[in-house]
Amino acid sequence: DAGVIQSPRHEVTEMGQEVTLRCKPISGHDYLFWYRQTMMRGLELLIYFNNNVPIDDSGMPEDRFSAKMPNASFSTLKIQPSEPRDSAVYFCASKSTNSGNTIYFGEGSWLTVV
Amino acid sequence: AQSVTQLGSHVSVSEGALVLLRCNYSSSVPPYLFWYVQYPNQGLQLLLKYTSAATLVKGINGFEAEFKKSETSFHLTKPSAHMSDAAEYFCAVSESGGSYIPTFGRGTSLIVHP
């Protein structure tokens, strides 16, 4: 089975540019999560969806960040405008209520804003 | 409310020595408990999980963890460390009251010396 698929794996962008990170969860999973990992803050939950509906976005740092899940197989995390402090690894993860509630992570999107 | 504390941000062992990574949790109901491993430049991978069955859980790569309710602990052990075990290890807890949304610890970096 394919795992959680994220793109791009690496992105370097200039401050002020828009960044869009993409995620395809594991087929059949009803929860999707976006995390951010930095040395300073560790692993932070930004937002999660259940059945494509955003449930908790209290971890989203500020209005520059937005996330959507237009269907069960696709989600985006957008940063506009990007800032150097947004440089981090962004992970998408998914889980299924009906199969043990184990969360599975993608390989991450490594973002550098210069 | 659920929470996780990982004692020690770094643990250093010699190759062949016992590995012990500590995790204490707080949960108002019987929890699910997880250990994840993150190798350099990769995503988090499930190492093992406890879901109220046997209290001693065996995972991949020779790791195991024991659920001790009286101590609210779920420490990760491996009898003999290999160089390839060097990685970041995360403990996580989830519970029914929180829709099984996991809370992660800050992580413990395992360093293995030759």
Image: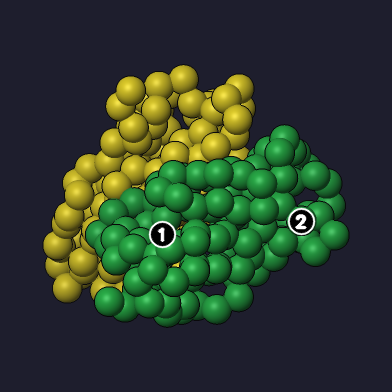
Chain colours: A yellow, B green
Q: Is residue B39 above or below residue B49?
A: below
Chain letter for mark 1, please.
A
Left or right, A87 with respect to A100, comes to left
Identify the residue shown where x is 60% and y is 75%. Answer: B7
Identify the residue shown where x is 67% and y is 53%. Answer: B66
Q: Which mark is residue A45?
A: none
Q: Which mark is residue A36?
A: 1
Quadrant where the C terminus of chain B lies?
A: bottom left
Residue designated by label 2: B68
The quarter of the picture where residue B2 lies is: bottom right
Identify the residue shown where x is 55% and y is 78%. Answer: B8
Identify the residue shown where x is 59% and y is 34%. Answer: A101
Q: Callout 1: helix, strand or loop?
A: strand
Q: Is residue B70 above or below residue A32?
A: below
Left or right, A113 with respect to B44, comes to left
Q: Callout 2: helix, strand or loop?
A: strand
Q: Amino acid at mark 2?
A: Lys
Return the x and y of residue B99 as percentages of the image width and height: 69, 38
Return the x and y of residue B14 as percentages of the image width and height: 38, 77
Chain letter for mark 2, please.
B
Q: Looking at the image, how many numbered discs can be counted on the residues?
A: 2
Return the x and y of residue B10 as percentages of the image width and height: 46, 78
